[in-house]
Image (cartoon, rainbow, N blue to C red):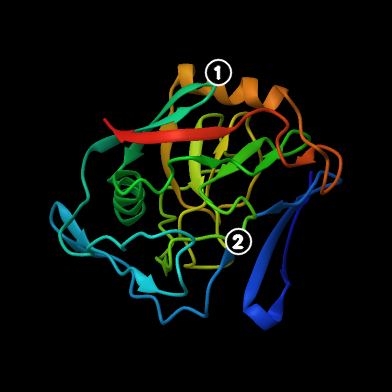
């Protein structure tokens, strides 16, 4: 199946862009963010077991939140964040070695309550199998008011079931939106894979996906019909 990747600008007066990932006739996966143009990315600077990360200010966050510190970010081992869905708990094991800046940001957002009382706003069930979350506005355009760089060295394709990756609107535009793959899907290696969920969490996501979508974008892609609310998130 041929993968076609295009960049389509929308709402240019607000500086918003959308990225579309289309697999054959399947619905496009719009991994979007809303922010001003990024500054030149600096990447990560290894310093033994830690790295330095750059979290670049963009626009106003969708809800109050502070960027994490970019100094002495752990770059070994793992951490765990539990997303407490209305449908059940989903534990994400964050891979600090593979994506230290991403894991650090995700953990910081969870600690600050960013994911509390939010709903996963986008679901793909035909050709692409994902649940997209992390936007408090539920529009696909909300973000935390900062961007950070891609960490793609360990991103593998096809994306296996259970992998968690960052949504973006182009290179080095990671914010808060992420997606969980619940069935192997041929996405390109353009999205930072930073964690995985276990079999129990995968069962929760698969059950939510079974509820289908409203097909608001095209058949098999749109807003989930099931209750995808994340009531809260906790560390460990």
The mark lying in front, picked from 1 and 2, is 2
Relative to 21, does residue 173 appear above or below in the rendering? below
Residue positioned 51% across, 52% down in the render:
177
Residue 169, position as x, y percentages in the image: 59, 65
Residue 63, position as x, y percentages in the image: 44, 58
Residue positioned 51% across, 48% down in the render:
134
Q: Residues within 10 Å of mark 2 (few under 14, many from 20)?
A: some
Q: How far apart, in angstroms, are the residues tagged by discs 1 and 2?
A: 28 Å
**Depth check, front residue: 225 or 158:** 225
Q: Earlier in the sequence, mark 1 or mark 2?
A: 2
**Residue tagged 2:** 141
The tag on residue 203 is: 1
**Depth check, front residue: 92 or 89:** 89
Which part of the image, by quadrant, shows the N terminus?
top right
Q: Is residue 47 left or right of residue 210?
A: left
Residue 179, position as x, y percentages in the image: 55, 43
**Which of the 4 image quadrants contains residue 84?**
top left
Q: Residues within 10 Å of mark 1 (few under 14, many from 20)?
A: some
Residue 154, position as x, y percentages in the image: 41, 48
Residue positioned 86% across, 39% down in the render:
219
**In the structure shown, which secondary structural element does the residue marked by tag 1 occupy?**
helix
Residue positioned 33% across, 54% down in the render:
105
**Which of the 4 image quadrants contains residue 223?**
top right
Q: Is residue 39 left or right of residue 229?
A: left
**Depth check, front residue: 27 or 89:** 89
**In the structure shown, which secondary structural element does the residue marked by tag 2 occupy?**
loop
């Amino acid at each position: 199946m041929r993968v076609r990747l295009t960049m389509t600008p929308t709402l240019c007066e607000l500086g918003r862009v959308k990225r579309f990932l289309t697999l054959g006739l399947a619905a496009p996966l719009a991994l979007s963010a809303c922010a001003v143009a990024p500054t030149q990315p600096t990447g990560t600077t290894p310093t033994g077991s830690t790295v330095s990360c750059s979290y670049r200010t963009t626009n106003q966050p969708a809800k109050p939140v502070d960027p994490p510190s970019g100094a002495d970010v752990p770059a070994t081992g793992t951490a765990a964040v539990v997303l407490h869905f209305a449908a059940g708990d989903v534990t994400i094991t964050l891979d600090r070695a593979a994506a230290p800046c991403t894991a650090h940001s995700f953990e910081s957002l969870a600690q600050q309550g960013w994911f509390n009382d939010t709903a996963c706003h986008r679901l793909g069930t035909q050709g692409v199998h994902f649940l997209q979350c992390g936007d408090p506005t539920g529009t696909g355009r909300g973000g935390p008011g900062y961007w950070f760089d891609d960490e793609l060295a360990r991103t593998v394709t096809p994306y296996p079931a259970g992998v968690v990756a960052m949504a973006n609107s182009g290179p080095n535009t990671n914010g808060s939106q992420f997606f969980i793959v619940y069935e192997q899907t041929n996405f390109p290696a353009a999205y930072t894979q930073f964690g995985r969920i276990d079999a129990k969490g995968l069962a929760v996501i698969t059950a939510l996906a079974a509820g289908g979508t409203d097909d608001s974008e095209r058949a098999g892609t749109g807003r989930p019909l099931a209750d995808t609310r994340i009531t809260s998130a906790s560390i460990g």
